[in-house]
Amino acid sequence: MATKVYETIELELLDGRTITVKPLNLKNLRAVMKEWQKASEVENEDEFLDVLIKCTTITMTQLDPTLEDDVEEVMDLQTMYKVLEIAADIRLNGPNQMAAAQAQVGTN
């Protein structure tokens, strides 16, 4: 019997649809990480949110391509955080992680 070494979760979106979130394949993970690097260059919260949305949109190309164009419509911030945590191991939900992210955009 094979051993599963990653976490898979079901998330309900704002429109009631459910998606299965699991880690990205390496091709999509590279694309997310390339976009995520831009987070260190943002100058305000709006630009940081744009990076989060772009990373989540890239993630949706693997998890549910029908949602690629609808990320902003069907997800709230906490849902995006959870998707990125499971799919790309980007953790933004803890106080230390949020403080670091806020420091990057100068909003302490």
Image (tube, rainbow, N blue to C red):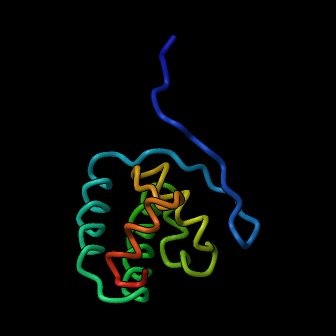
Residue closer to the observer: 72 or 50: 50
Query: Does residue 74 appear to the left or right of 5 in the view shown?
Result: right
* Residue found at the very far front of the displayed protein: 108
Relative image position of residue 14 (x, y in whole percent): 71, 72
Q: Quadrant of the C terminus?
A: bottom left
Residue farthest along the top direction in this orientation: 1
Look at 43% across and 89% down and name the residue there: 46
* Percent of width and height locating residue 80: 54, 66
In the image, residue 103 sits, relative to residue 23, either above or below, namely below
Q: Is residue 36 above or below residue 4?
A: below
Task: Give x and y (percent) for residue 81.
Answer: 52, 63
Residue 34 image position (x, y, % from top left): 23, 65
**Can you say whether 100 is above or below 69 in the image?**
above
Quick one: 20 or 79, which is closer to the camera?
79
Q: Residue at x 60, y 64 (%)?
A: 79
**Side of 51 relative to 53 (left or right):** left
User: For the view shown, which residue lies furthest in the right direction?
Assistant: 16
Q: Quadrant of residue 11?
A: bottom right
- Residue in view at x 41 percent, y 49 percent: 89
At 30% from the left and 88% from the top, the residue drawn is 43
Count up the numbered dots: 0
